[in-house]
Image: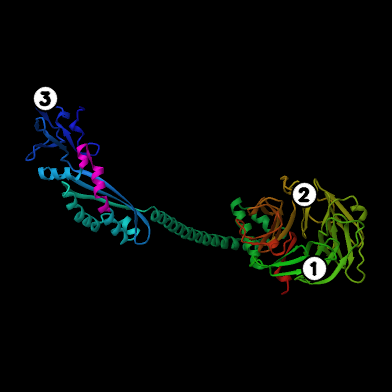
Amino acid sequence: MTTFDPRRIGTHGCVAAMVPVDALPRRGKESTLPPTCAALIGRGRDRLAVVRGGEPLELDVGDNVLLFSPAVQTAVIRVERLLSADDHACAATLELEIQVIAEPAELAALCRAFPSVSSALTVEEISRRVQPSVTAILSAYAAGLSAAELLRGPEHAHAAERLRDRLAPELFAAGLSLSRIASIRFESSTWEALRREQQRAELLARQTQTDLRIAEMAEAARRQRLAGMESLVQRLTALAAERPGVGLSELIRAFGPTERGELYRASLGLSAGDATTRRIVAVAGQEIIGIRPDAPETAEFRTTLPSDAGPLRSVRRLPEGGLLVGAARGVFWTSATGEVLRSFMFEPSAALRGGVNAVARAADRLLATHSEVGLISWPIEGDTEPTYPLRDLLSAATTVRDVQVDDGGQVWLAANDAVIRWTPGDGWTQRRILSARVGALAVDASLVVAGLDDGRVVGWPPTADDSPVARSLRPATGDAVRAINVLRAGGVMYVLIADGRPMVDLCVADDAYHMEYRATEPLRWGWVGPDLIAAVNERRDRIFLWPIGRSDAPSGVAPVSRWCGHTIQDAVLVPSQTAPAA
């Protein structure tokens, strides 16, 4: 027969075992119990004796020996599928401290309650015996409390009292005593997930509030700093006015790089306070579309033009408030909101792929550039039959664009890699050859600016003399310049450059300072007004807007293609002082 080691009792969850005499290690008739083990010896029906640990056993053949642990044992009972009062699935873990009652009668009751003691009685089996009672009590208890109360309650005294009242007699009848209820713990994965989500929301709300406070403080500091810089710009402007030949930008260049940037931003802020942009006007398909800068999400107006001149290609504004709209085979002179006032057409000698890319008024004539036709001229009054000036000069050109008229009445346009200046009265022309094809041209009273296909931006004064050397405003970048616009703000000349990157650059014409107005996608064209920057994306379906003094992110987007189903062909900014009410 296999020998049973009494040291197993009290270890690995073993509480008691009925062991044959022959299975116990002994010397002769005696055996000694280890200190952690006790025994009940039965000799016949009425002769029962309890032997404590460490005492010798005197055994005879036929004796019944029940070995048991007199120490306190911990029973862990798990209850699943509980439901809280607020309908959260819960589970509970209960720890009971129990002990075998070392009295002959109670030990006999233990044997009757647990037949498995004939081999080995474990703590797990005791737990299974009281599981139904524990489940019933904790189910009722959980149903009366919310999940938060169940999980946050550290003691659950009421549940412990009910468990003690129910389990103590039940265990006693089985020869066991309930020493104490060590702990009751509830858990709920659904409530914990909800709590984590609430904590994240609370943290986000606190972080948002903190960010808002920080942003408000930063904005207040920025405004205070800007106010100081604007005051300094005003003093510098007054000082420049007292010194003929000295411009504001020359005085600003005397400051360090950081101060220069802040002063240039301040000059832009002062400019924005003097004038505003009334609207952006875009052409797409056969429509002229008006967009208010303060409400770019919806069109202010949409006007459809006749289709007899072909699809619309460009738009320019007139100082008195009207618009000049270029089409495939002509130009429309319209009101500020697109009502056609006059039409100027031409008949091409062959089929055309493009259209009029720029229109300008030169005294009593309208001028238009078209890469496949050249320069087209119409008289404003009387017969509107077109003529084609500079035909010989432009005959070999593959691109003719950006016709403009300066304050002296001279006409400027770009053709391939040249910028041409022409005086209509006497036919005088000047041709300046540049290092690459001209992608965009802007003419100001004191500066002509050309953007080239290699990314270079150059400028020179528009004097009658053809000797001024073009100075570099920006070196070659490899990104072809597609749009150039100029702005005078507070005595400083700014140049806006768009070249297909996800930003447009606003550069100071005679300094290295520039601001990058950034978007999340490439930008094709850009325009600058006294108070805002506008740009069309590469897909030509939207117009992005920025306040002129804040370049970090667009303040608004006009979804033009969503309104009309066509791509944007061109746009123009209309300042408030030149746009009568529609």
- Which residue is depicted at the point 10% across and 36% down? 41
Dominant SS of magenta comes to helix
Compared across the picture, whether 382 is left or right of 532 comes to right
Disc 3 versus disc 2: distance between alpha carbons?
111 Å
Above or below residue 502? Residue 411 is: below
Residue type, label 2: Leu
Q: Which residue is mark 2?
A: 452
Disc 1 versus disc 2: distance between alpha carbons?
33 Å
Front position in the image: 191 or 291: 191
Residue 371 is one of the magenta-drawn residues: no
**Nearer mark to the viewer, of 3 and 2:** 3
Residue 128, percent from left and from top = 26, 47
Query: Quarter-wise, where is residue 248 in the image?
Result: bottom right
Residue 55, percent from left and from top = 9, 33
Front position in the image: 135 or 405: 135
Compare marks 3 and 2 and give the one earlier in the sequence.
Answer: 3
Q: Which residue is mark 3?
A: 27
Compare marks 1 and 2 and give the one earlier in the sequence.
Answer: 1
Query: Quarter-wise, where is residue 61 in the image?
Result: top left
**Image quarter (top left, top right, bottom left or bottom right) of the C terminus:** bottom right
> Which residues fall within the magenta stretch?
115-134
Q: Which residue is mark 1?
A: 305
**Nearer mark to the viewer, of 1 and 2:** 1
**Image quarter (top left, top right, bottom left or bottom right) of the N terminus:** top left
Compared across the picture, whether 116 is left or right of 198 comes to left
Residue type, label 3: Arg
Residue 245, percent from left and from top = 73, 58
Residue type, label 1: Leu
- Among all residues in the image, which is located at the extreme bottom? 581
| Dots 1, 2 in contact, CB < 8 A | no
